[in-house]
Image: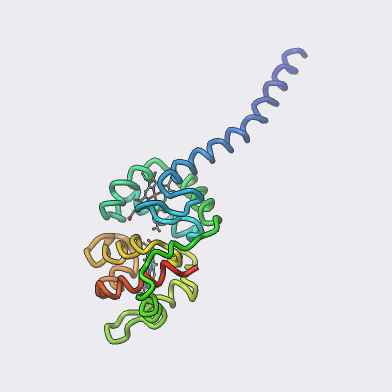
Amino acid sequence: MKRIEAIIAILAIVSSTVPALAGEAETASVRNCTWCHGTSGRGFMTAPRLAGQRLQYIENQLLGFAEHTRDNPFSKQYMWGVAAALGPRAAHDLASYFSALTPNAASDGDSQLAARGRTIYVEGIPDSNIASCLVCHGPEAQGVREIPRLGGLSYYYLKGRLEQWGEGYHSAAVSPMPLIASKLSPKEIEALASYLSFVK
Ligand code: HEC
Ligand code: HEC
């Protein structure tokens, strides 16, 4: 009888500490991301904003880093190692955590170029056969399903991403973007990145 009571007591202790440990592990793994991606996932230096990004998109990118289909220098340097260490469950939990945070706009583009950027975003450039971005990324650039939010991402990050497809990076990832972005001129990229950095 004494032994059974002791076992029950131990079980009670174990089961009460498990959720507490899980909670600590979660904060620790979020901190593994936010020391680069900024407080509340609001971006820092070259690490983009994750707050309010689409859950499925974040998961897909983590897979892309792990499988090396997202292959520009910063991805290689900063994200390949991080993503290799994440299981699918942790990737899903982190994606769901960051997608639920409130996004904020970087507003760091050139405001004089924003109007031109908006026109391209909404209408595309029919003469150059460039599709409207709005059709996929949504009227408020908020994204939908696995298509990412672009609104409020930083000018430098957006500009870099739009240039990379034209330079041949990320070509192994299945995405319409290499075809779309490789047709944009440097001026059009600056205008789009400027506009989008201000979108709330
Ligand atoms: C050492 C710094 C560093 C750490 C730690 C880090 N990241 Fe990153 N992350 C970056 C950088 C830099 C980029 C931008 C890569 C590029 O320019 O393509 C990035 C890109 C990303 C992207 C792509 C976002 C987009 O809009 O396409 C996701 C998703 C991401 N990181 C998630 C995470 C998660 C989740 C963690 C924690 C498990 C994490 N990162 C930890 C530096 C870091
Ligand atoms: C046919 C649908 C479609 C159209 C049109 C489209 N996109 Fe995309 N875009 C996508 C998808 C899907 C992704 C995610 C790619 C991936 O998972 O690697 C993406 C990703 C992006 C990203 C990466 C965001 C990040 O967080 O790294 C940028 C920037 C982008 N698109 C800009 C644009 C711009 C600017 C236009 C208009 C000139 C445009 N897109 C038109 C579907 C589209």
x and y percentages locating residue 200 in the rendered image: 50, 68
- Is 10 above or below relative to 183? above
Q: Which residue lies most toward the bottom here?
A: 127
- Kindly identify the residue that appears in the image at 39 percent across and 83 percent down: 123
Q: Which residue lies most toward the left here?
A: 167
Residue 179 visible here: yes
Residue 147 visible here: no
- Kindly identify the residue that appears in the image at 70 percent across and 26 percent down: 12
- Kindly identify the residue that appears in the image at 40 percent across and 46 percent down: 36
Q: Residue 110 lies in what quarter of the image?
A: bottom left
Image quadrant containing the N terminus: top right
x and y percentages locating residue 140 in the rendered image: 49, 73
Left or right: residue 87 compared with residue 166: right
Q: Residue 147 lies in what quarter of the image?
A: bottom left
Q: Which residue lies most toward the right here?
A: 1
- Is 3 above or below relative to 56? above
- Is 84 above or below relative to 170? above
Left or right: residue 115 compared with residue 187: right
Left or right: residue 193 compared with residue 94: left
- Kindly identify the residue that appears in the image at 30 percent across and 66 percent down: 162
Left or right: residue 118 compared with residue 103: left
